[in-house]
Amino acid sequence: MIRITKEFKFEMAHALHGYDGLCKNIHGHSYRLWVTVKGAVKNEKGYTKDGMVMDFVRLKEIIKPEIVDKYDHSLVLNANSPHADLNLPSFEKVFYLPYQPTSENLVMDFANQIKSKLPENISLCKVILSETATSFAEWNSEDNQ
C-alpha cells in the first residue's frame, strides 16, 4: 500500500456562536486542506494510470467541487444558533451548517464527504484542515474505525 496526499487552499469566513473569545465575531481564514488516501499501485503495462495509486487529477475532481469551490469565499454559520436568523440575501455564498463551524467539525464533515466519493480500491487515511499557519485539526482513519 502507498499513500498519496494532495493539498488544497481556499478562503472562508465563519463565526462561532457562544464562543468566549474573538472568534464569536465574523472573521476569515486562509484554509489549507491536505487529503491523504492509500491503495495499491497499479502495475499494468499499457494502462494509462500504470504506476499510480490514484491519479491526482481524479482526487482533485472529488474534492474541488464538493469542498473547495463550494466554500471558497463563503460565510459559514451554525444553523442551530441565532446566526440562522440573519438576513443575508445580498451575499451569494452563505452556508448554515448543522453544527458549530470549528475546524474540528469541518474536518469530520469533509472526511465523510470525501470517503463517500472515493473509488472502491482507495481508502481515506487522513484529512488535515489548517485555519492558520500554526493551527490545524486532523481526521485520521485509525481513530475513526
Image (spheres, helix red, strand yellow):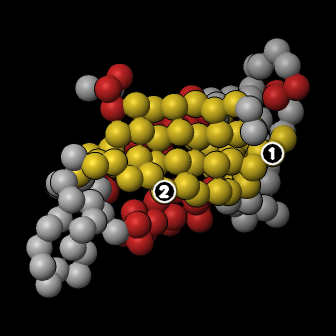
The image quadrant of residue 132 is top right
Q: What amino acid is at disc 2?
A: Lys
Q: Is residue 78 visible?
A: yes
Q: Position of residue 61 (x, y in %)?
A: 42, 69
The residue lying at 67 percent from left, 57 percent from top is 10
Q: Position of residue 24 (x, y in %)?
A: 82, 27
Q: What amino acid is at disc 1?
A: Gly
- On screen, residue 20 versus residue 125, left or right, reads right
Work out whether mark 2 precedes mark 1 in sequence or the reverse, and give the earlier one.
Answer: 2
Q: Nearer the viewer's eye, disc 2 or disc 1?
A: 2
Name the residue carrying label 2.
6
Q: Secondary structure at mark 1?
A: strand
Q: Along the line of sight, which residue is nearer the eye, 100 or 132? A: 132
Question: Considering only vertical position in the picture, is 67 above or below 48?
Answer: above
Q: Is residue 109 visible?
A: no
Question: Considering only vertical position in the picture, is 63 above or below 112?
Answer: below
The residue lying at 51 percent from left, 31 percent from top is 138
Question: Considering only vertical position in the picture, is 102 above or below 67?
Answer: above
Q: Are marks 2 and 1 in contact (CB under 8 Å)?
A: no
The residue lying at 70 percent from left, 39 percent from top is 131
What's the CA distance linking mark 2 and mark 1?
23 Å
